[in-house]
Image (cartoon, grey):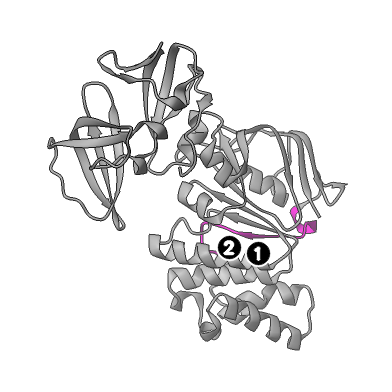
Amino acid sequence: MSIIFEDVSFSGNNDAPVYNVNLIFEPGSATVLLGPKGGKTGKSTLIKLIAGLIKPTHGKIIIDGIDSTNIPVQKRNVAMVHQQIINYPHMSVFENIASPLRVMKIKKPQIQKEVIEVATLLRIENYLDRYPAELSGGQQQRTALARALVKRAKVILLNEPFVNLDYKLREELRSELKSLLKSRHTIAIYATQEAQEAMALGGICVLLQEGKVIQQGPASDIYRTPLNIDAAMMLSEPPLSVFSGTISGHEVSLGGSLTFPKTHAMEGIKSGKYFFALRPGHIRLTPFNDDDLELTMRVELAEISGSGTIIHTANSIFKLVLNLAGVHAYKTDAMIKVYVPLHKLFIFDQDKYLIKAPGGGQ
């Protein structure tokens, strides 16, 4: 079974529009739909189109070789998990999970077997007699996920299912989900706005911006060679630091006052104006590489994020964001030295399309 979008567009009601989408979801594949935070990107619209909750205003959706554009949701073999945890409050965990099987008129012994099997996989087998109100948020979302998995659907749609859970729990469930999806020959489509989630789940990644697909492919490939600055930003958390500059002869100039020799990686790039970008994790507080550029920066903000520290800095030319391992305390307006590895610079043209990506070990 496969799902093919042929030049699909949608506009109307309160759902975000999508434009001229052409995608193929292969059997057994896991695809992440990723869009930037804020605004309407079209991720949820694509999920609803696949489920049959809404119909395209243009184009076709081919499911298993059949034009399914007008087939209603009731007749599609699709399971969904939403960002809002949806369970039947009057039913036990067992009955919540078993409900799709009862609709399918599966015999009781088989229902018992399958419910226990999927509950064990999701580590909620000890809560089968409880009701949703007696569960933690993570246990409730596991119950909703178990109900979707037990349905035997050929397609499972996950629309930001962990967004309302705390960070640690999200990491745990994400890891479990990745293993579960690998073990089942289904098409799994996961919508998220979290770059870390997209990278952790792996598989094929589809980047969406304002209803358009701007790049698709293995998440690791897009991370290494983004098509443009927008794509690079989507798969970087915290976002890349981007600044403009000029390559002229054998020299690079940033902001008209900071200059350094053109690196070996920049050979062959014509003189002209470019955008340069750097991932926050590549900037250090101590020299590490032969081509490190030492800069004096002013701390604008230092914030603890999990087991790391994100430091926002600025000078008279540009801003840089550092993502450091460990906890670091810096006062606002403190002056610090940072070291920028020039071989880690992305270079984009004036239209913001990639000219040069860093080498290995990004």
Residue 194 versus residue 356 in the image, above or below = below
Residue 166: tell me if it is visible. Answer: no
- Quadrant of res 239: top left
In the image, 231: left or right of 108?
Answer: left
- Seen as rendered, the residue at the extreme bottom is 109
Residue depicted at x 78% and y 79%:
106
Residue depicted at x 74% and y 88%:
109
For disc 1, the marked residue is 182
- Nearest the viewer among 86 and 38 is 38
x, y percent for residue 51: 70, 52
Q: How many marks?
A: 2
Residue 1: tell me if it is visible. Answer: yes
For disc 2, the marked residue is 178
Residue 84: say if magenta. yes
Circle number at residue 116: none
In the image, 198: left or right of 110?
Answer: left
Asked whether the residues under the numbered discs 1 and 2 touch, taking CB atoms below 8 Å apart as contact, a structural biologist would say yes
Residue depicted at x 48% and y 39%:
234
x, y percent for residue 148: 65, 66
Range of magenta residues:
73-86
Q: Is mark 1 on a helix, strand or loop?
A: helix
* Amino acid type of the residue that numbered disc 2 sits on in the rendered structure: Lys
- Nearest the viewer among 157 and 307 is 307
Residue 203 versus residue 261 in the image, above or below = below
- Nearest the viewer among 303 and 257 is 257
x, y percent for residue 90: 55, 77
Residue depicted at x 58% and y 62%:
178
* Amino acid type of the residue that numbered disc 1 sits on in the rendered structure: Lys
Residue 359: say if magenta. no
Q: How far apart are marks 1 and 2 (CA)?
A: 6 Å
- Quadrant of res 238: top left
In the image, 43: left or right of 317?
Answer: right
